[in-house]
Amino acid sequence: MDYQFLKLIHIISATVLFGTGIGSAFYMLLANRQSNLPARYFVVKTVVIADWLFTAPAILIQFISGLLLVITGGYEFSENWILLALFLFFFAGACWLPVVWIQIRMRNQLKTAVDDNADLPPSYSKFDFWWVLLGSLAFPAMILIFYLMIMKPEF
């Protein structure tokens, strides 16, 4: 497969991954800081959908196209910048997987609260705390991956 075409696919999927992630985080963070439960439910429900439609496929495309770029680009998997990028990729993924589970729980709790015209359970705040924490760990990892992919530093 052509290196430049793979690079295009890799850049587009990185853009989708990062853009969906930052956009979803922004809207969900703002929604969870206000009291309108139906609006919160709509945002969280939409973020869960966006993760399945955009984030999950972009993660797979990133991984596959990245591996193919290493192979077709003549790089070695033992190069430190590639090893670090892979580590950070899996670290961010290890943060994202529980976030998906948390978002689904938050969506379900919001739906119940809206349907029953009730308050959210105390666990919702705990889910929100972990959602923010895990996202705050994954975000700098993604920025570092961008740096490594562009600069390909030797160290």
Image (cartoon, rainbow, N blue to C red):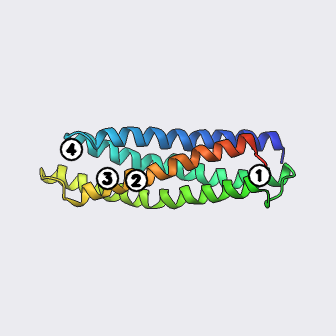
Element under disc 4: helix
Labels 1 & 3 near each other (Cβ < 8 A): no
Q: Position of residue 116 (x, y in %)?
A: 13, 54
The label on residue 79 is: none
Q: Which quadrant of the structure image shows residue 98? A: bottom left
Element under disc 2: helix
- Badge 1 or badge 4: first in the primary sequence: 4
Labels 1 & 4 near each other (Cβ < 8 A): no
Q: Position of residue 58 (x, y in %)?
A: 59, 48
From the viewer's perspective, is residue 38 above or below residue 66?
Answer: above
| 95 left or right of 79 in image | left
Residue tagged 2:
133
Residue tagged 3:
128
Residue tagged 4:
37
Query: How far apart are the alpha carbons under marks 3 and 2?
Result: 9 Å
Neighbourhood count class around disc 4 (C-alpha, 10 Å): few under 14, some 14–19, many 20 upward: some
Q: Position of residue 110 (x, y in %)?
A: 24, 52
Closer to viewer: mark 4 or mark 3: 3
- Badge 3 or badge 2: first in the primary sequence: 3
From the viewer's perspective, is residue 4 above or below residue 115?
Answer: above
